[in-house]
Amino acid sequence: MKPSALYVLSAYLKKWSYADNKLTINYTFCINDGYYRKHKELRLNKTAPMISELLGQLLKDAKNGNSAPSDEPVRFVGEGEVKKKLSGFFNKIAKEFKGNKKTRGKSRMISSRSIDFYYNDFEYEQLEDDVKFYVHLNRGLNKVSGDLWSNAVSDFKLAIGFKPEDITANKYLAMAFNKLGQFSDAVVPLKIYADSENTPESLNALAIAYINLEEYEKADEIFRQITENFSDSNIALFGRAQIGYKKGQEFLSHLDKIYEKNPELLVEKLKTEWEYKLPPNSSNATIWNAATAARYLGFERPFDLTKKAFNQEIPCYFNADKGTIRFVKEEIDCWIELHNRYNIDGSTYQVYENKLLPQEKGKTPKKKSAKTLS
């Protein structure tokens, strides 16, 4: 019987504990048509026993997750090279672990915390295309785990080059584009993801991309599809509320319906998913600096407001190159209304128009654009 080929793709030091003399290793591998991300806690020991324990766990995971019969043999591809690289990896970790333990964690860790088993070109080029796909998918997911979204794009693109219709690669490529604000680039992979998975979550991701592109009719059509095909309509209600807000129309009734059924869910979605920013071409946007916005909200110092803004607690626009921060009155008003109406953080907020300077009262709204907010 021909053994299944097990490819170890990467390993990563997730954490360590001085008190317990232990460390946790995240590792990834592929076998047949399966890709797996696992972790293992190891007691710091001599290198050989640690390698043996980790590879034993890998073999066990591979047999448990493999679609082939459980009694089918499994072999490590390039086992000797895997052991060699793990030996260097664990030796470096052990040296720094002991050094940090002596200084009670005050010294910095200077070595790489991860290892890519196919980093060298000569090892990579020998792989078959289906394994190369997993190499790039894995690299992209590892970068996503470190919030390196821009760096992840190229690997997801390379993965899709081997498997154009793969759901996972297209899903995360779209997520990366969304994180980078490249919403038009996200549509094609999101369509593949949504068509293949056909879940409320995948359809919602596509609808959100259309909202960001201000293609509200396409987004609303998807939300109607979610309502018709799935019993839970909260995703559609939340999406329609977002569309209403972006278009300057009534939107609270949709949120009220969610709140009546599940207030905790609505509060969590408002904390994590609600987009306060109005479209860049909005004609109803009054742009303020920190001093004006602080007076409007009753802060004694602009610093108190900007601190809240930098903690992402209130909508703002920060230009790192110029060191400027701007606020939009209408977005602040929405932030206050939602927090007060749904008791998002247990506080009640109010505005202080009487504290505005005479020239700021009744100020004609400025058209918001990328230029005016930079």
Image (cartoon, rainbow, N blue to C red):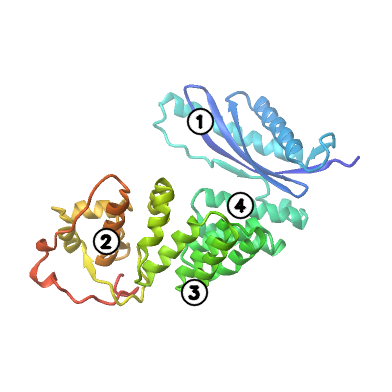
Q: Position of residue 172 (x, y in %)?
A: 58, 57
Q: Nearer the viewer, mark 1 or mark 3?
A: 3
Q: CA distance from mark 1 to mark 3?
A: 50 Å
Query: Which amino acid is tagged 1?
Result: Trp
Categorize mark 3 by other alpha carbons within 10 Å: few (<14), some (14-19), many (20+).
Answer: few
Q: CA distance from mark 1 to mark 2?
A: 43 Å
Query: Which amino acid is tagged 3?
Result: Glu
Q: Residue at x 77, y 54 (%)?
A: 126
Say whether disc 4 or disc 1 marks the residue closer to the N-terminus. Answer: 1
Label 1 close to label 2 by CB (< 8 Å): no
Q: Is residue 240 above or below residue 19?
A: below
SS type, badge 3: helix
SS type, badge 1: strand
Say whether disc 4 or disc 3 marks the residue closer to the N-terminus. Answer: 4
Q: Residue at x 29, y 54 (%)?
A: 341
SS type, badge 2: helix
Q: Quadrant of residue 57?
A: top right
Q: Nearer the viewer, mark 2 or mark 3?
A: 3
Can residue 5 be seen in the rendering of this structure?
A: yes
355 on left or right of 60: left
Query: Which amino acid is tagged 4?
Result: Arg
